[in-house]
Amino acid sequence: MFEQAVAFAGETVEDLGTVTHVSRRDFDERPTFRFRAQVPALEYLSLLIENAVLLRTHRGGRLYAGFERLSRMEPVVDRYMRIADVSERVYVFGEPDWTPPRHPNMRVIELSDASRLAREWFVVADSPALRVALVGLDEEGMDARGVPEERTLSALKTHDPAIVRRLASAAEGLIDKSLGN
């Protein structure tokens, strides 16, 4: 997903370099940007997207979320259950080291530990009311550092509708492939 996001963004991407944090202003005012940051910055941007989904969607959209390992979803599982309540469908990707609760609007896509996607963090919201994506790649691997929050990821955030639609389509392709379609 990360490589596709970078390719889809092409020349429109602004590179912020390595940052210690990303502000709400950056999130709102910069249509598409790349950056490198530690996990807390990506958690913050993910929270902004998740909250926007909760406030703006009404069964008209889909959310695709990659957690690397499903256990990384556990601290935010209640939020994702609520997102599933207000979304057409929520797709959660990750290595199956934890079992999320069941929800009729949520489907879990299990990844093998050898899958490159298991090293990616993403939240892609595709609905008539909200099109935004955050895609990150852990180049070192989750086990490279002892403290998960100290990991640095390369990331791209966009609210360009064309890029978000293409990322959603790419995620749908991954879902179809995982289901053997």
Image (cartoon, rainbow, N blue to C red):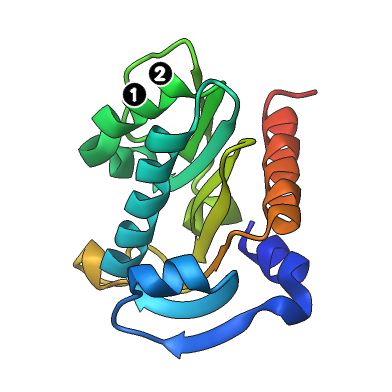
- Nearest the viewer among 159 and 173 is 159
Give the amino acid type for the residue marked by disc 2 in the picture: Asp
* Identity of the residue furthest to the top in this view: 104
Relative horizontal placement of residue 146, taking residue 172 as reference (left or right): left
How many marks can you see? 2
Mark yes or no: residue 160 visible. Answer: yes
Above or below for 121 versus 90: below
Percent across and percent down for residue 30 are 54, 74
On-image quarter of the N terminus: bottom right
Above or below for 117 versus 73: below
Please tell me whether mark 1 sits on a helix, a strand or a loop: helix
Give the amino acid type for the residue marked by disc 1 in the picture: Met
Asked if disc 1 and disc 2 are in contact, CB closer than 8 Å, the reply is yes
Q: Residue at x 46, y 66 (%)?
A: 28
Q: Which mark is residue 116?
A: none
* Residue 33: quadrant of the picture: bottom right
- Dot 1 corresponds to which residue? 81
- Nearest the viewer among 106 and 181 is 106
Relative horizontal placement of residue 172, taking residue 71 as reference (left or right): right
Percent across and percent down for residue 120 are 50, 57
Q: Residue at x 44, y 67 (%)?
A: 27
Above or below for 160 versus 55: below
Percent across and percent down for residue 173 are 75, 38
Please tell me whether mark 2 sits on a helix, a strand or a loop: helix
Q: Which mark is residue 85?
A: 2
* Residue 89: quadrant of the picture: top right
Q: Residue at x 76, y 65 (%)?
A: 8
Relative horizontal placement of residue 92, taking residue 50 as reference (left or right): right
- Nearest the viewer among 119 and 42 is 42
